[in-house]
Image (spheres, coloured by chain):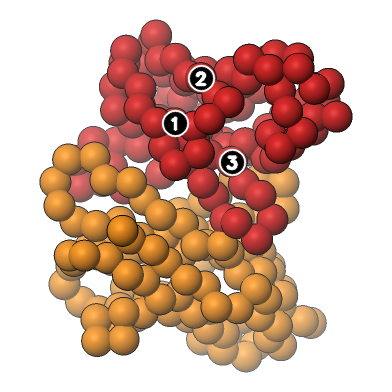
């Protein structure tokens, strides 16, 4: 069972470069999320999606864009990377209904912006 | 606004001793509460949740948590710690009203089990 797969696992960018992080889930989940994890700050929600073709802002959306063209994929884009975006990024997905609160996480993408 | 606090950055416990990782929360209504565990270089894994009913919730790997409404706490416990329990533990909360509700995660507590 693949679960939630994130690519790439590591990336180094220069300030101003762009990149896209890919998240794929094979559990037919409706909900998908992007978080960033920074020391001492826990997980902070960047954007989320409650279904194919829909996206919404989380608590730290600035500098990021997302798309959910297919149910199984959730893409996170950085148009012009900044050093403040150095972080570990996690994608997660979950079911609808009462079980939707159990989130399944990918292994993370470690991003450094120089 | 909902929030969750994990007052200890790190908890050290000897192998075989009981362990407790503390969590307190704040929501406007009734809470859904969760514990997740993160091993090095891995994503978070679900351990257990409280939705309603029995205040003592049992989860994976022998962990349990006690919901205390009067103290707004949801502490994670295990009767006998293993070295393999060493990891980062996150408490999370969301408000119960219907529709999509954001889950708020705590800052995490590093558990170190000493052989």
In the rendered image of the structure, the colour used to display chain B is orange
Distance, label 3 to label 2, CA atoms, is 14 Å
x, y (%) of residue A26? 44, 23
Q: Which residue is mark 3?
A: A36
Tag 1 subunit: A
Q: Earlier in the sequence, mark 3 or mark 2?
A: 3
**In the rendering, which numbered label is found on residue A65?**
2
x, y (%) of residue B19? 57, 84
Judged by depth in the image, the label closer to the viewer, 3 or 2, is 2
Question: Could you tell whether B98 is left or right of A66 in the image?
Answer: left
Vertical order, B82 against B27 (above or below): below
Tag 3 subunit: A
Residue B56 seen in the current view: no
Local packing at callout 3 (Cα closer than 10 Å; few below 14, some 14-19, many 20+) is: many
Residue projecting furthest to the bottom:
B17
Tally of numbered tags: 3
Q: What residue is drawn where x is 31% and y is 86%?
A: B71
Could you tell me which secondary element the residue under label 2 belongs to?
Answer: strand
Q: Which residue is mark 1?
A: A47
Local packing at callout 2 (Cα closer than 10 Å; few below 14, some 14-19, many 20+) is: some
Could you tell me which secondary element the residue under label 3 belongs to?
Answer: strand
Q: Nearer the viewer, residue B49 or B84?
A: B49
Q: What residue is drawn where x is 20% and y is 47%?
A: A98
Could you tell me which secondary element the residue under label 1 belongs to?
Answer: strand
Vertical order, A54 against B100 (above or below): above
Question: Could you tell whether B98 is left or right of B21 in the image?
Answer: left
Q: Which chain is red?
A: A
């Amino acid at each position: 069972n693949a679960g939630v797969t994130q690519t790439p696992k590591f990336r180094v960018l220069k300030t101003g470069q762009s990149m896209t992080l890919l998240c794929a889930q094979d559990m037919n989940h409706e909900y998908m999320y992007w978080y960033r994890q920074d020391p001492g700050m826990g997980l902070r929600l960047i954007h989320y999606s409650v279904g194919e073709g829909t996206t919404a802002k989380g608590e730290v959306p600035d500098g990021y864009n997302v798309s959910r063209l297919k149910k199984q994929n959730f893409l996170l884009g950085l148009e012009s990377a900044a050093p403040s975006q150095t972080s570990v990024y996690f994608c997660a997905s979950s079911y609808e209904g009462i079980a939707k609160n159990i989130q399944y996480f990918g292994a993370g993408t470690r991003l450094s912006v120089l | 606004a909902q929030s969750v606090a994990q007052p200890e950055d790190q908890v050290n416990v000897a192998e075989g001793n009981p362990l407790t990782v503390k969590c307190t929360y704040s929501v406007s209504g009734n809470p859904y509460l969760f514990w997740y565990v993160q091993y090095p270089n891995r994503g978070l894994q679900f351990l257990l949740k409280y939705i309603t009913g029995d205040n003592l919730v049992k989860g994976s790997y022998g962990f349990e948590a006690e919901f205390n409404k009067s103290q707004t706490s949801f502490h994670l416990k295990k009767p006998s710690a293993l070295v393999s329990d060493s990891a980062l533990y996150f408490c999370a909360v969301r408000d119960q009203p219907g529709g999509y509700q954001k889950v708020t995660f705590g800052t995490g507590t590093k558990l170190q089990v000493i052989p």
